[in-house]
Amino acid sequence: MPTLNPDDMAEMRPIKFISRDGLTIRGYLTIPHQAKESKVPLIVNPHGGPYGPRDYWGFNPETQLFASRGYATLQVNYRGSGGFGKDFFLAGNKQIGRKMLNDLEDAVAHIKMLDFIDHEKIAIYGASYGGLATLGSLVKTPDLYICGVDYVGVSNLFTFFKSFPDYWKPYLGQVYEQWYDENSPEDQEIMKQVSPALNVDKITKPLFVIQGANDPRVNIDESDQIVENLRDRGFDVPYMVKYNEGHGFSHEENSIELYKSMMGFFAKNLKSNTLQSGYK
């Protein structure tokens, strides 16, 4: 991207903190230039996976886009992320919707100690597992975030498991060990508690949902469920579906529309002087 001016790029600062249960968690904070003059809103951006992938220091087009609009972005390598050793990786087993979300909450508490973060304007946005983490956070800590964006995210672990194609079956043992075992009564109870589509009564903040209709990894039914269940309760949910997209948008015109809509959603909720509600 030779047309980008390096001087326009926002600082990406490594962070480190201790979680509530004593685990060392690392991540990155991208800081917009506006933070030198005033408090700025914060977007928490959990990465996908969740097991194995991680965030890295370096040019990130999304965090730089957010920074250009005056938003700080927090990326957290929560437990289960790759690159931090076996113990850290295994610490994420069966912690989806539980300690993995605690790590995000603890990261926000750590970042709040910086004097340029607006504590009243914190959003969460993620794709794939990051979408599940977004929905789960709006369920688990509805007062922490002012709004959320779910991009091709899982909403119901029961239907997600049933959507697995046949060629995934050799990996089910690993899935049951890392995620949850759908055949275990104990795990089934946890799955009910951490499946956002089954707990929409706890979601009170504005939500924007984005989905590719041909997604082979996270079936469109996952997004349909969360939208339908919320709308049945009178909750206003903007829902963008592209029928020529899969697990993430690849067509330029769709990506431009996605980010224009997302920036509008964030501006409405993070730059307004009044708190928004998801109810009509």
Image (cartoon, helix red, strand yellow):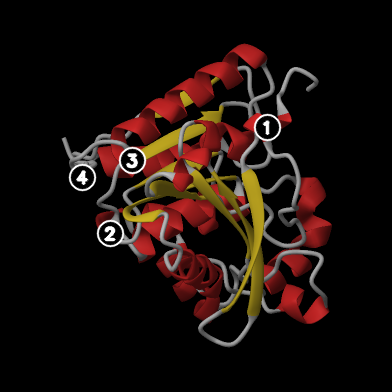
Q: Residue at x 51, y 83 (%)?
A: 20
The residue tagged 3 is 270
The residue tagged 2 is 202
Residue type indicated by callout 1: Asp
| Residue 275: assigned label | 4
Q: Are marks 1 and 4 in contact (CB under 8 Å)?
A: no
Q: Residue at x 81, y 47 (%)?
A: 167
Sooner in the amino-acid sequence: mark 1 or mark 4: 1
Element carrying mark 4: loop
Q: CA distance from mark 1 to mark 4?
A: 34 Å
In this rendering, the label closer to the viewer, 1 or 4: 1
Give percent across and percent down for residue 212: 58, 28
Instruction: Name the quadrant containing residue 213.
Output: top right
Foreground pick, 160 / 71: 71
Is residue 163 left or right of 97 when viewed as pictured?
Answer: right
Q: Residue at x 63, y 30 (%)?
A: 8
Foreground pick, 80 / 216: 80
Q: CA distance from mark 4 to mark 3?
A: 8 Å
Foreground pick, 22 / 166: 22
In this rendering, the label closer to the viewer, 3 or 1: 1
The residue tagged 1 is 7
Residue 225 seen in render: yes
Q: Residues within 10 Å of mark 1 (few under 14, many from 20)?
A: few
In this rendering, the label closer to the viewer, 2 or 1: 1
Residue 97 seen in render: no
Sooner in the amino-acid sequence: mark 4 or mark 3: 3
Give percent across and percent down for residue 257: 51, 17
